[in-house]
Amino acid sequence: MHTQDANYVNYKLSTELKKIEKLKGAVALLDVEDRPKNTHTFYVDSKAKAKKFDVSKELNTHPALLDRAYNRPTLDALKNMKLHEALDEEFITKASKHSIQQYNELSKRIERVQELSVLSRKLEVKKKLTNKNDPPARLLKPATKTNAPIYVWKKERKR
């Protein structure tokens, strides 16, 4: 029965991890720390030109939009945009509510994955403790809400 419980917890853990990956893709996490820093290299003829080089002029965009690697509109496109007609108050509130809901769901799923991983480790330790062939283990740290118990077994030489 313990193996069925452990297998079920591991199954739920893997499904939650897959759902988190889908949500991360849908939410478009732009400010994630573990995202690699992209670089765009510009080559200039001389050091004097390198000192005077302006990236916003080269890319023909507003300096505030330089951090965006995606959908970076040019100055001409910004002048021709009709933002007042395209964005109304109701659309903005719906979009912000939807993104807040998605972020909340993502945070709840991440918490659930942490709980399931702790539960999985607790079941694994419990299974190892019930094995009669192993020598008795000594408790190093008791279980907490966020960590499984830590046991130390006597080292036995394998021949």
Image (cartoon, helix red, strand yellow):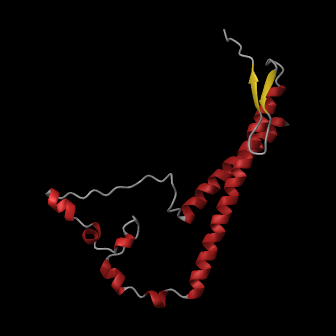
Indicate left or right for 83 with 50 as reference: right
Comparing 73 with 10, the one in front is: 73
Viewer-proximal residue among 33 and 26? 33
Image coordinates for residue 46, horizontal then vertical, percent: 14, 57
Rendered position, 152 above or below 103 = above
**Closer to us: 93 or 20:** 93
Along the line of sight, which residue is nearer the eye, 123 or 65?
65
- Quadrant hosting residue 81: bottom left
**Residue 38 x %, y %:** 38, 55
Q: Quadrant of the N terminus?
A: top right
Residue 72 seen in render: no
* Quadrant hosting residue 2: top right
**For the point 57% across and 65% down, which residue is it?**
27
Tell me which residue sits at (57%, 87%) in the image: 89
Q: Residue furthest top?
A: 159
- Residue furthest to the bottom in view is 85
Indicate whether 108 appears above or below 59: above
Number of numbered markers: 0
Q: Give the side of residue 148 with respect to residue 103, left or right.
A: right
Residue 14 visible in this rendered orientation of the protein: yes
Residue 84 in picture, x, y percent from top left: 47, 90
Q: Quick check: 82 above or below 42?
A: below
List x then y, in percent, for residue 21: 59, 55
Name the residue at 53% across, 62% down. 29
Residue pictured at 35% horizontal, 86% vertical: 80
The quadrant the C terminus occupies is: top right
